[in-house]
Image (cartoon, rainbow, N blue to C red):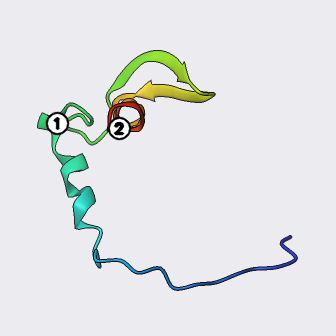
């Protein structure tokens, strides 16, 4: 158990989770029509397992943006 919890306000402009709606669109290549994640060949980047296209996008953003 935690011995101490620190809470602080974080300023933000997004008040909805609508920015994640694009992940439900199969045309993006991340999810299938049924909603399942599209798998990709296993890779490991900085001890981070990349096994699907959602994780693959995350590693792409980390290195190219």
Between discs 1 and 2, the one toward the N terminus: 1
- Label 2 SS: helix
Give the left or right position of residue 40, taking residue 10 as reference. left
Residue 61, placed above or below residue 15: above
Where is the C terminus found, in terms of image quarters? top left
Residue 46: x and y in percent read 59, 27
The reply to whether discs 1 and 2 touch (Cβ–Cβ < 8 Å) is no
Residue 53, placed above or below residue 18: above
Image point (50%, 17%), residue name: 43
For label 1, the residue is: 28
* Camera-nearest label, 1 or 2: 2
For label 2, the residue is: 61
Residue 54 occupies quadrant = top left
Image point (55%, 27%), residue name: 49
- Label 1 SS: helix
Residue 47: x and y in percent read 63, 28
Q: CA distance from mark 1 to mark 2?
A: 15 Å
Residue 1: x and y in percent read 86, 70
Q: Nearer the viewer, residue 16 or 25?
A: 16
Residue 24, placed above or below residue 40: below
């Amino acid at each position: 158990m935690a011995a101490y919890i620190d809470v602080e306000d974080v300023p933000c402009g997004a008040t909805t989770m609508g920015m994640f709606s694009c992940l439900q669109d199969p045309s993006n290549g991340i999810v299938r029509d049924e909603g399942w994640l599209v798998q990709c060949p296993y890779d490991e980047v900085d001890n981070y397992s990349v096994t699907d296209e959602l994780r693959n996008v995350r590693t792409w953003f980390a290195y190219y943006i």
